[in-house]
Amino acid sequence: QKEVEQNSGPLSVPEGAIASLNCTYSDRGSQSFFWYRQYSGKSPELIMSIYSNGDKEDGRFTAQLNKASQYVSLLIRDSQPSDSATYLCAGPEGRGSTLGRLYFGRGTQLTVWP
Amino acid sequence: GAVVSQHPSRVICKSGTSVKIECRSLDFQATTMFWYRQFPKQSLMLMATSNEGSKATYEQGVEKDKFLINHASLTLSTLTVTSAHPEDSSFYICSARPMGGGRYEQYFGPGTRLTVT
């Protein structure tokens, strides 16, 4: 059973548009989620952390967490070609484990065309 | 802040030799460090989790005798690929989880691209 699911993608948007990336999770006890950006051939880079229900904004990025629906999203406003990358959603494994691992979604490939 | 370094960035070795990869958290202490492998166009695959001073926990299907992990301090973990074979060629990435406060985020190193000939 996958803990974190990213089913959308690949996603292609024009420059200046809003890109919306989505993720669902299965563990109702999860308290925090993370969005990573991975450029081709590079390692993942943490771009957003969200720990509570609601929205968190950081520049052009907004992360949304809806615990009732077990849904996490990332909105990228004014998308730029430099935003073209694979975006990974991640959440911690269940409270029964002490290892502190993260479950990663398969990723959504975003292309922003000029 | 939260910088993780990894060395070497790229290594080519002959089949049957061993390769050591270092992972360091430069500006924070890490409760836990993780080792991932990623093949082209595929997802991250967690290989093992290591805590300073204790044995690593390997994921199912990962050979602990082949992938030796040493976590010598709160800022350094090493992965040694022993008796490497061409099928071990991959992108190896470490990550580190900062100490304290119930934090789960991981910061990734830049990765090591291993090619076994």
Image (cartoon, coloured by chain):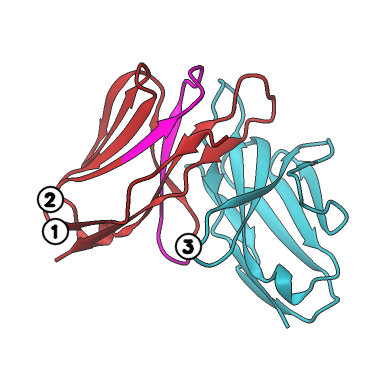
Q: Identify by letter the chain in red.
A: A
Q: Residues within 10 Å of mark 2 (few under 14, many from 20)?
A: some
* Labelled pair 2, 3 in contact (Cβ < 8 Å): no
Given the image, on which type of amino acid does mark 2 rest?
Answer: Ala
Image location (x, y in percent) of residue B99? 62, 29
The reply to whether the magenta stretch includes residue A29 is: yes
User: Who is closer to the viewer here, B5 or B95?
Assistant: B95
Q: Which residues are magenta?
A: A22-42
Query: Where's the C terminus of chain A, which quadrant?
Result: bottom left
Q: Residues within 10 Å of mark 3 (few under 14, many from 20)?
A: some
Look at 67% across and 53% down and name the residue there: B23
**Residue B5 shown left or right of residue A82 in the figure:** right
Q: Identify by letter the chain in cyan.
A: B
Query: Picture quarter containing residue B53?
Result: top right
Secondary element at image label 1: strand
User: Who is closer to the viewer here, A102 or A27?
Assistant: A27
Task: Determine the CA span between mark 2 and mark 3.
Answer: 25 Å
Image location (x, y in percent) of residue B35? 67, 50
Callout count: 3
**Of discs 3 and 1, which sits in the foreground?**
1
Q: Which residue is mark 2?
A: A17
Say the numbered circle drawn on residue A14.
1
User: Who is closer to the viewer here, B34 or A103?
Assistant: A103
Given the image, on which type of amino acid does mark 1 rest?
Answer: Pro
The chain letter for the residue carrying disc 3 is A
Query: Picture quarter containing residue B13?
Result: bottom right
Q: Which residue is mark 3?
A: A42
